Image: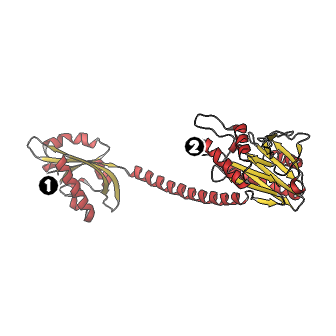
Amino acid sequence: MEGTKPEWLVQMEGILEALNEGVIIFDDCHVCLYANDCMTEMTGFSREEMAGRPPAQFYAGEDLVFIMKQISKSEQLGRNRYEFYVPRKEGGRVPAIISARTIEDPDGRHFAVVTFTNISEQKRAEAELRAANEQLEKRQREIEAELALASRVQQSLAPRCIRWGGVAVETVYQPAHSIGGDFGLVVPRGDESLTLLVCDVSGHGISSALVANRIYTETISLLERRAAVGEILRRLNELVLRQIGSAGFFFTLAAAQLGPRGRRMHFAGAGHPPTMWVTPGGEARLLEAKSAILGALEDAVASEPVVEVDLDPGDRIALYTDGLTEVFDQHGEMLGIEGLREIIRANARKPLAEMKQSVLDQVSAFRHGPHTDDISLVLVEIN
């Protein structure tokens, strides 16, 4: 090997040996003239085993075809850079970035200086990253499947449109995400009473949905024990404070119980937007909550939390969550209680199902962009 080296290569050996990359010098016949120590460590071949050998001695089949195409490209352009591998003596492979440059010596002969950068660590990291991403994608698919099931479960708990004697009820539940923190209840007890309730748990997503479902279950249990609306507020407040309590967490609700034939209503609200009561004459009254938000304070429920109301045929009641009021137009103006009040009043003479759809459509028309909060709406008509 020493006898075939040109003078300029002998002079450069010290520099080439100091490099942290493998280097091979090929002559114009594609025969190896020189390999540095880094190259011998990378391949496991000694200098003598590489000297005087062309690429065909190290590559075969499609790999040799690829290498020869890259050599041809290097000769045409004077340089080249690509990713491939370096074969090891024992049969393994070392992934590498291969950079080739053609030079001409003082005698007019052409040589190729080819460097090989070992990227084994990079490839290992990429493989680990791919494996991690595959695990994340698998977990994401599992989460999406779980959320889809949770969404179906939550939708199954949404209040249903019913007729209870002379009382008609229309309902809406629209979570901002696949699951949400709102829920509503429409629970008849024979001819004795009809309970209507909407609840809004702070936050969004999985945690809010879990808490909402716990409150829902407890509320159903209280109704089965014939609890009045004031008692429901107190028990739910105690439940969350003692079993779920978390700093910054709270919920609001509005509940109404109608007596036989729907002529008498007991109403109780806790930190919730006022319930709307529209008379046949077009007057839209507000039934304000007398209690504070629940789940944060021991004494949140007022000593007299219930308001009693006598209802007449044609009266309509709207219980809702703030997903219908805290919406903004393109100028940043909020619809608010008064905006929703006017929408409900203006549509109160329509059939109840049409009224429900008109309210949703007009809120949507006011809102700029998609809705970002859960929406629950319970509309009641006394006949």
| CA neighbours of label 2 inside 10 A, class few (<14), some (14 to 19), many (20+) | few
The residue wearing badge 2 is 369
Front-lying residue, 219 or 352: 352
Left or right of 243 in this view: 73: left
Secondary structure at badge 1 equals loop
Closer to the eye: label 2 or 1: 2
- The amino acid pointed to by label 2 is Gly
Q: Is residue 181 visible?
A: no
Dot 1 crowding, Cα within 10 Å, few <14, some 14–19, many 20+: few
Q: Nearer the viewer, residue 383 or 295?
A: 383
For residue 364, which quarter of the picture? top right
Mark drawn on residue 305:
none
**Furthest-left residue in view?**
107
Q: Which residue lies at the image location 86% right of the left edge and 52% below the top edge?
A: 257
Q: CA distance from mark 2 to mark 1?
A: 68 Å
Q: Name the spot of residue 142 as percent of width and height, x first.
A: 59, 59
Give residue 194's position: percent from left, percent from top: 85, 56
**Type of amino acid at the residue the image marks with label 1:** Cys
* Image location (x, y in percent) of residue 135: 53, 57
Residue 64 vs residue 307, the one in the foreground: 307
Instruction: Give x and y (percent) for residue 153.
Output: 69, 60
Q: Front-most of 295 and 49?
A: 295
Residue at (83%, 58%) from the top-left corner? 166
Q: Residue furthest bottom?
A: 61
In the figure, 60 relative to 14: above or below? below
In the image, what residue occupies the spot 14% across and 51% down?
28
Mark 1 — residue? 29
Residue 144 relative to residue 83: left or right: right
Q: Is residue 233 left or right of residue 56?
A: right
Q: Are marks 2 and 1 in contact (CB under 8 Å)?
A: no
Say left or right for 124 vs 142: left
